[in-house]
């Protein structure tokens, strides 16, 4: 399965020490465009996720070729999102890992299957990789400064079977 990731999912999972969930979920590895590498590793040096992503051998950097499409997407998205969506097209990926609302909307409009940090955590809960989704969502908010609306938070807990009566 070919998977492309944007920086937010890498940083968020790193913030709660769960980056390896991606390796478990996608054993063939995860591709990232050069812009995501720069954002997480170079610009983000010393920040959450930087060293974890740099040392993860299962994360592969691939340069995008279609700079015209990237520039078109840059009218609405940041560079990392634009390159991730473009890379998805170029390598004919199966899933794109995105959290940002605008990026998700555009990726879906282009027919790309989108999965975010919450979706990865739901998969991890379902597959016994984590014990409590609620605990990890709360950690995301505290440690990762992850913004999650209450409706999405409650729905995720409901899907995970963690709704308190």
Image: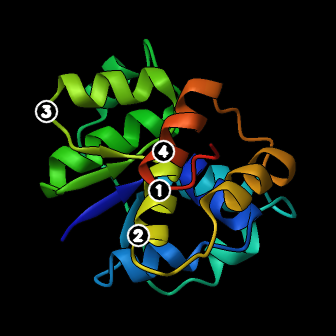
Q: Which mark is in front, 3 or 4? A: 4
Kindly report the distance in space between the C-alpha atoms of the residues bearing marks 1 and 2.
7 Å
Residue at disc 3, secondary structure: loop
**What residue is shown at x 30% (from left), y 34% (from top)?**
67
Q: Which residue is mark 2?
A: 126
Out of 146 and 162, give the one closest to the viewer: 162
Q: Which residue is mark 3?
A: 111
Q: Which residue is mark 1?
A: 160
Q: Is residue 150 visible?
A: yes
Q: Which residue is mark 4?
A: 158
Kindly indicate whether the residue at mark 2 contacts the one at mark 1 (C-beta within 8 angstroms).
yes
Residue at disc 2, secondary structure: helix
Relative to residue 50, is residue 72 drawn left or right?
Answer: left
**What residue is shown at x 37% (from left), y 70% (from top)?**
30
Image coords of residue 2 (percent x, y): 21, 66
Looking at marks 3 and 2 on the same chain, the residue that comes earlier in the sequence is marked by: 3
Most extreme residue toward the top, as rendered? 75
Residue at disc 1, secondary structure: loop
Looking at marks 4 and 2 on the same chain, the residue that comes earlier in the sequence is marked by: 2
**What residue is shown at x 78% (from left), y 44% (from top)?**
141
Kindly report the distance in space between the C-alpha atoms of the residues bearing marks 3 and 4.
27 Å
Looking at marks 1 and 3 on the same chain, the residue that comes earlier in the sequence is marked by: 3
């Amino acid at each position: 399965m070919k998977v492309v990731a944007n920086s937010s999912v890498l940083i968020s999972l790193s913030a709660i020490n769960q980056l390896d969930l991606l390796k478990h979920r996608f054993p063939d590895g995860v591709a990232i465009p050069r812009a995501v590498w720069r954002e997480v590793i170079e610009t983000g040096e010393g920040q959450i996720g930087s060293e974890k992503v740099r040392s993860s051998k299962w994360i592969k950097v691939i340069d995008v070729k279609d700079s015209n499409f990237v520039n078109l997407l840059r009218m609405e998205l940041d560079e990392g999102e634009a390159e991730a969506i473009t890379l998805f097209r170029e390598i004919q990926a199966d899933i794109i890992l995105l959290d940002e609302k605008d990026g998700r909307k555009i990726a879906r409009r282009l027919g790309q299957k989108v999965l975010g940090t919450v979706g990865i955590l739901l998969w991890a809960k379902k597959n016994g990789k984590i014990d409590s989704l609620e605990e990890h969502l709360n950690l995301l908010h505290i440690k990762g400064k992850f913004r999650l609306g209450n409706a999405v938070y409650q729905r995720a807990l409901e899907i995970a079977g963690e709704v308190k009566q």
